[in-house]
Amino acid sequence: MDKKVLIIGGGPAGIETAYSLALQDVKVVMIEKDANVCGNIQNWEKLFPDFKDAEEVRKILSQKLNHPNIEVITNTEIKNLYPQGNLWFAKNDDERIFEANAALLATGFEVFDAKRKEELGYGIYDNVITSADFEKMYKSRKILTAEGRVPQRIAFLNCVGSRDEKVGNHYCSRVCCINAVKQAIEFKELVPDAKAYCFYMDMRMAGQFYEELYRKSQEKYGVTYIRGRTSEAAVTRDNRIQIKAEDTLSALPMKMTVDLLVLMVGIEASAGTTLLSEQNDVLGLYGFAKPLGLYSEDNMTTKPGLFLAGTCKRPLTLPETLADARSAATDIIKYLKTTK
């Protein structure tokens, strides 16, 4: 097939779509704004729910880009995307123009900036960190407080930046609950005698093996789950963190002091997703790109030749993202076969 597809974004969705197209003899130009491909999984050590080594997954994905039909361009951010006739054009800051028969948005997601929740103390108190910060610590197998101590009491707080009217995100980010379970287990494996608490609104264990891992965290590792809404965090004289919350099961207020508070930050639309979606009138809720439909048209848009894959549409897990990318490739090939 003498056709070319432009893929914007070099994360899992972009890579999997590119490889699926390349296998069908479609030429692909994949453009990534950062120096490296693979997107957000570069920031994780292990993946849920099977604790798969993230580096191994990154290697598998990266190897797919060695296909001769795939050209990868990094350190290039697309600022303008537009159709002209039956072709799609993309332009970067240097006014370089890329041309193709179809385009795919695979611009991924960004993690919620926890500083927007000032009452939780991120960026204010030393011993309040995010789930992304926890992953960086875990890579060195050393979970430590700002003073260099091994925490004996740690709390994981779910729904930071998700299901929150104050910040304007009413949706569930899908990954935070199971990620809190994973990180609590990782902590308990490193510090077996410590106490680990997880504050939650609802534990949403909807994926395969999620419920089993949740049960295992309690039965084998002794993680304590508290159904409660946290109103604020404050620092104590000895630089520990005091949490004020409501135990919603007993309808009583409570206080708890921990050595380290981990904020489970949710998923938000990336700036690139919002920008390019708005330019093409496919901007949906919360800054995500809007597909044509949720069922047979989930990878398509109202613009012929413009397709979507992965978390540029909404929060998805990694297996869901990869499956969605293969679906996008199928729709793109159908489109290319019907256009000149």
Image: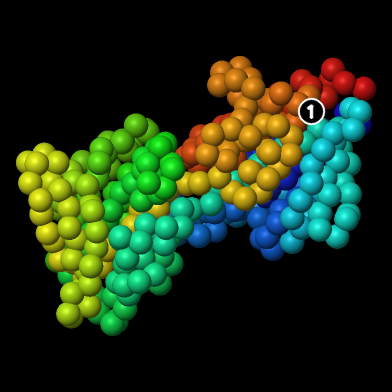
The x and y percentages for residue 102 are: 81, 32
Q: Which quadrant is the N terminus positioned in?
A: top right
The x and y percentages for residue 143 are: 31, 70
**Can you identify the residue that label 1 sits on?**
305
Q: Tag 1's secondary structure?
A: loop
Is residue 306 shown left or right of residue 15? right
Whether residue 70 is visible here, answered yes or no, is no
Q: Which quadrant is the C terminus positioned in?
A: top right
Identify whether 68 is placed above or below 196: above
Identify whether 103 is placed above or below 194: above
The residue sitting at 30% across, 60% down in the picture is 119
The x and y percentages for residue 51 are: 39, 50
The x and y percentages for residue 154 are: 22, 63
The residue lying toward the viewer, choosing from 170 and 294, is: 170
Count all numbered tags in the image, as a single digit.
1
Whether residue 274 is visible here, answered yes or no, is yes
> For the residue marked with disc 1, what is the amino acid?
Gly
Kindly indicate the quadrant of the structure image that contains residue 13: top right
Identify whether 154 is placed above or below 80: below
